[in-house]
Structure formats: C-alpha cells, structure tokens
Image (cartoon, helix red, strand yellow):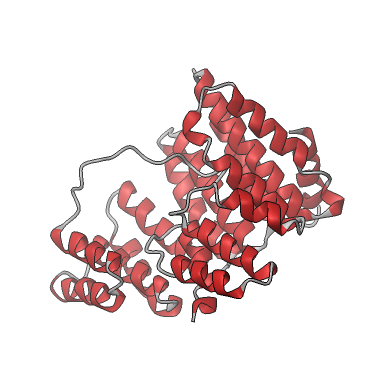
Amino acid sequence: MKRFKSAVLLLLSSALLAQAPAPQAQPDNAPAFVKQARELLKDGKTADALAVYQNELKASPDSIDANIGAGSVLDLMQRGAEARPYFEKAIAAAKTDDDRANANRAMAMSWAFEGNCPQTVLYEQKVLDLAKAKGDLNRAAEVANEEARACIDSGDIETAGVWYEEGHKLAMSQPNLTEAQKDLWDFRAAHAGARVTVRIGEEGGDPWPEVQKAKAILDKGNIPQQQIFYPYLVGYVAYYQNDYKKARENFQQANQNDPFIQCMIGQTYEKLGDNAHALEFYKKAATATGHNPAAAYAIRVCKPRSK
C-alpha cells in the first residue's frame, strides 16, 4: 500500500475496487413498465425500451423510474445530451434521500458514458454525502470506488487514485469489521493500487507488488467470491505493459459476461493484430445494457468499433 499511496501523493500536487461482489438476489419490486423495458433491452430492442419509458412519462411526467429509465436508454444509444434532461427531471422530482441518491447517481453515470470524470465526481459526491449523512460508511465507500472506477476508465488517473484511497479509508473506518470485510476492502485497495500504478507509467513504480498483495489476500480464503477479479487484474496490468498475450490469457479467465472484460478482450485482440476476433468481442461489449462504469466503458470505447 505504501507504493500506491506514494504514487497518489505525487499526483495530488497536479490534481471497482476491485469490482464490487455480485449483489444478493432481491425481490424485483420494479413497476411493470420497468420490467417490460428491461426485457426489451435484453432482446436488443433499445428503441422500443425507450418508447416504453416515454409513454409512461406522458401519463406521469414526474415519474423518477421512467425519467431515469429513459435517460439510461439514451446513454446506451450514445445520446447523452438528450439523456441528461431526464436525469435533471428525476433529481428535481425526488422527495426522499433514496430517490435523490438514485437520480444523482444516474446523472453521474451519464457523464461516465462520455468519459467526463469531473462531472461524474460532481454528482457521485452528492450520493456519497447522502450515504455519509445516514452513517452508511460502507455505501459511501462503494460510491467512492465507483467514481474512482469511472475516472480511471476515463483516463483521469490522478482523480481515480484519490477516490480509491478515500473509498478504502471510509470502509476501514467502519466499526466492528469482520476479517472477511477487512480482506475485501484490502483486496480492493491492492487491486486499485496495481491498476493506478500501471496507468501512471514508469514514474508510478512497479504494479506487480500490489498484484501479489491482492493474491496473498485471496489466498487467506476469506473472500472466495473475489477470485474472479484476480485474472482481470493480471490481464489489466499485462495489457498496459504491452504484454498482450498474457493479457488475453488472463482476461479469458475473467467474467466473460462483463462488458468491460469483453471490451478489453477485443482491444487485446486488436493489439495482437487479430481483427476478426476483436470485432467479435466489440460486438458483445456493444450490447451492454447496464448503467454503470463497465457499460459506460464498453459503450464509449467498443460500440463505435463494433460497426
């Protein structure tokens, strides 16, 4: 961690997460129109999904779900300028802290789809502040990591390093953490440390000690659900060190349903001169339907290359 902190401190003068574990299944209490739009998105019917939300807004113009839904679909269509007025409407209509958090996070992700780190941070900060006001430090830490992830994917490495560090600090300040919880956040910090360091370049130092630290934490056995993020990390570091064969080998062991991984595999194949396989994975990444950093990267970077 010292190497990571040193790199960040050097960058501060000029200036997820590992990824979060899969959430536990929750009852789907979404309105019927939201479920309908989701199914249409799964089938690749983006324009039809947008129409569902817009039809709902004719009857309920202040619907937060419909405004966020319409904006999110427009982001998937790379029509961010049209998307953000919907998020502004959702923010204005929000009456509860949860609604305010959801609407502001949606706006933050809209800016992530355009690779705009400062605007992403501006709106994520509102979500983070709401979580802190409730005393939910774990949620605040996750938000910090999410904005860091959006920033590193946008190429703003300095800001990413700062927010990854803040996320770890917030998480570790929670009382009565279990060993597994400590390992989770230390693993995320090591994962982030390696990615930030390799993106800084030679002046940032060697990222592999952080990779080894991440592996040592996994080997303790307290967080087996995080194992899937290790080959992603090795592939990421190898890619940015121009070792594309090693990157491909490891990315292919990562989560193949993650649009970010699909996009990185496509980029790796392109670097290896295999344009046919690159296009195959670009097309997969281009079908992302989430409204999160992984989808933001896939849509922004790989969708244009999929045509």
Is residue 180 shown above or below 165?
above
Q: As drawn, is 189 to the left or to the right of 43? A: right
Question: Residue reaching furthest right?
Answer: 203
Where residue 121 sits, quadrant-wise, is bottom right
Q: Nearer the viewer, residue 159 or 248?
A: 248
Q: Is residue 301 visible?
A: no
Q: As drawn, is 61 to the left or to the right of 192? A: left
Q: Is residue 89 visible?
A: yes
Q: As drawn, is 33 to the left or to the right of 44? A: left
Q: Nearer the viewer, residue 253 or 232?
A: 253
Is residue 163 shown above or below 217?
below
- Residue 307 location (% of width, % of height): 49, 82
The quadrant of the image that shows the N terminus is: top right
- Residue 259 location (% of width, % of height): 47, 59
Number of marks drawn: 0
Q: Residue at x 23, y 63 (%)?
A: 39
Where residue 220 sits, quadrant-wise, is top right
Where residue 221 sits, quadrant-wise, is top right
Q: Nearer the viewer, residue 136 or 225?
A: 225
- Residue 93 location (% of width, % of height): 28, 62
- Residue 114 location (% of width, % of height): 53, 71
Question: Residue reaching furthest bottom?
Answer: 307
